[in-house]
Image: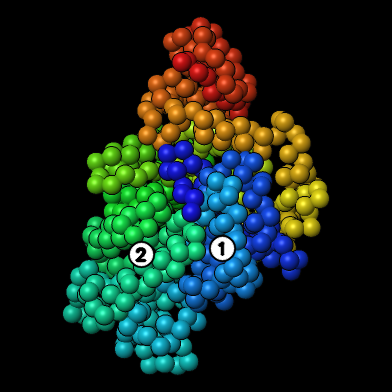
Amino acid sequence: MTSLDLQTGVLYQIYPQSFADADGDGIGDLPGIVAALDHLAWLGVGAIWLSPCFASPFADAGYDVADFTRIAPRYGTEEDLRTLTREAGARGIAVLLDLVAGHTSDTHPWFRDEPDRYIRSDVPADGFVPGPGGADWWYLPNFFACQPALNYGYAREDPAEPWRQDVDAPGPRANRKALRDIMSFWFDRGVAGFRVDMAASLVKDDPGHVETRKLWTQLRDWIEATYPGRVLIAEWGDPATSVPAGFHADFLLQFGGEDDGLPWRSLWNNGVGTVHEHWNQKTCWADAAGRGTTRTFVTAWRRAAAAIAAGPRPGVVGLPTANHDVTRPVAGPRDADQARIVTLLTLTWAALPSLYYGEEIGMRYVEGVGPLEGSSLGPRYERAGSRTPMPWGGAETARESRYLPQDPRPDRPTVADQRIDPSSLLAFTRAVIGLRSRDDRLRVDADLDVLHHDYPFVYVRGGSLVVALNPSGARTGSDLTGIGAARVVLERGLHRGADRLDLDPFGYAVLDQG
């Protein structure tokens, strides 16, 4: 079993139905991922995370699980998963699965046969929906109505809500045991860890997440004693809370934390393309207008890093380029040139980087596709545009998925075209991943000092590796003592004097002062 190195590794998220189709049925599958492993090894990623590949009716694209120990037939078989973990491991790549811990599909046998596993009421209640077929009971969804919340108990009693159970009632105990059983099943088949969907959602009415944190702490202790080397990565959005609670990593996301995810959104997810109606975000840092700031992000990262350092177990902050729920960096007016800034920051910051599939070539958010399998969350929140098929191109076009339409632009990027172009975003991404893998100054635990905020954003890793970024459409600069003597590692649009650095629009530089 190959492990994910949290200090130097790069995580790569794969949306299975969109990635690569080996059997020609139009849907991406596990054998297709196996066939793409050489590309991922060449790129230099250390682990892949698969969005849910378990049996499902796909009302929420697989996040509605009907059987946690069976591979969805559209993706293949358990043996295909074993092949994937074996072949990935042979290339030094760990395999992580997506664990939906807080709910199931309403087609899961538990929902029919084991009512104590779910939060149910004999009377109507706020937020509850009627049971199936005119049943005289109601249940609490965890997201969509087809996703009943698993019962991990309530942290507090309320006489007005008699359905509330204590966290040690039989149903919650059975569900905690089921988490271990599911993890063991896949750990025994070569899986290196899990990204946990909606990780903060388990115990209800839990001020400060006290009981939820206790649950994950116990699971972390069990994993380290029973399956050392495996990892848990949270979809919590608040690493200052979740990592001390037991996770090995948690992403700064578009939600979560003390300010509801604004630190991550303040970088580049400013709503170009389609965006959640309630964000109402006007600016971000990676915007040609140059009206954003890095201070919100840096403050949140420092808070999280300090909380992790003071916590009882090692862990790291995670930083994604995007994911299946949000707009890609290339969207609306933002192009692949600007995406280089996103890539360079993600791969050189003191965090576990996560690349969403296709962002190594600058796949864009595609307007006007969907809805499909629960992708639409509102009139202005359509996720399908971030889930379109990976464009392999060339001789590999035959394995492109047809799950959603391809980007219709005739100049859409393809892997084949960019593999032969030394100036491509793909070549750039590979170069930066290579730099990260061989330079200890880019380890997550290496020092990070911010020299200049905003435009340009300048920081130093490991005491001597300077990273300067200008995502704006105007030339920007900063006085930096002795910068003229530094060796250039990577640059675009760099101008320097002895003690000053300037960057052209969308310019960047990595400079070695060592």
Residue 474 horizontal/vertical position (percent): 59, 25
Q: Is residue 346 above or below residue 3?
A: above
- Mark sitting earlier along the chain (1/2): 1
Q: How many marks?
A: 2
Residue 186 horizontal/vertical position (percent): 47, 65
Residue drawn where x is 66% and y is 61% of the image: 31
Q: Give neighbour class at mark 1: few <14, some 14-19, many 20+ (Cα, 10 Å).
A: some
Q: Amino acid at mark 1?
A: Arg
Mark 1: which secondary structure? Answer: helix
Q: Give the number of the mark in front: 1 or 2.
A: 1
Q: Do the CB atoms of the residues marked 1 and 2 lie less than 8 Å apart?
A: no
Q: CA distance from mark 1 to mark 2?
A: 30 Å
Residue 299 horizontal/vertical position (percent): 35, 36
In screen coordinates, is 34 left or right of 482?
right
Question: Pointer 2: what residue?
Answer: 201
Mark 2: which secondary structure? Answer: helix
Q: Amino acid at mark 2?
A: Ser
Identify the image quadrant of residue 329.
Answer: top right
In screen coordinates, is 159 left or right of 367?
left
Residue 412 horizontal/vertical position (percent): 75, 46
Residue drawn where x is 42% and y is 60% of the image: 196
Residue 396 can be seen, yes or no? yes
Which residue occupies the foreground of this view, 396 or 197? 396
In screen coordinates, is 271 left or right of 227?
right
Residue 404 can be seen, yes or no? no
Q: Which residue lies most toward the top here?
A: 498
Which residue occupies the foreground of this view, 298 or 186? 186
Residue drawn where x is 39% and y is 70% of the image: 181
Per the rendering, the mark at residue 36 is none
Identify the image quadrant of residue 236.
Answer: bottom left
Residue drawn where x is 43% and y is 33% of the image: 443
Question: Pointer 1: what residue?
Answer: 82
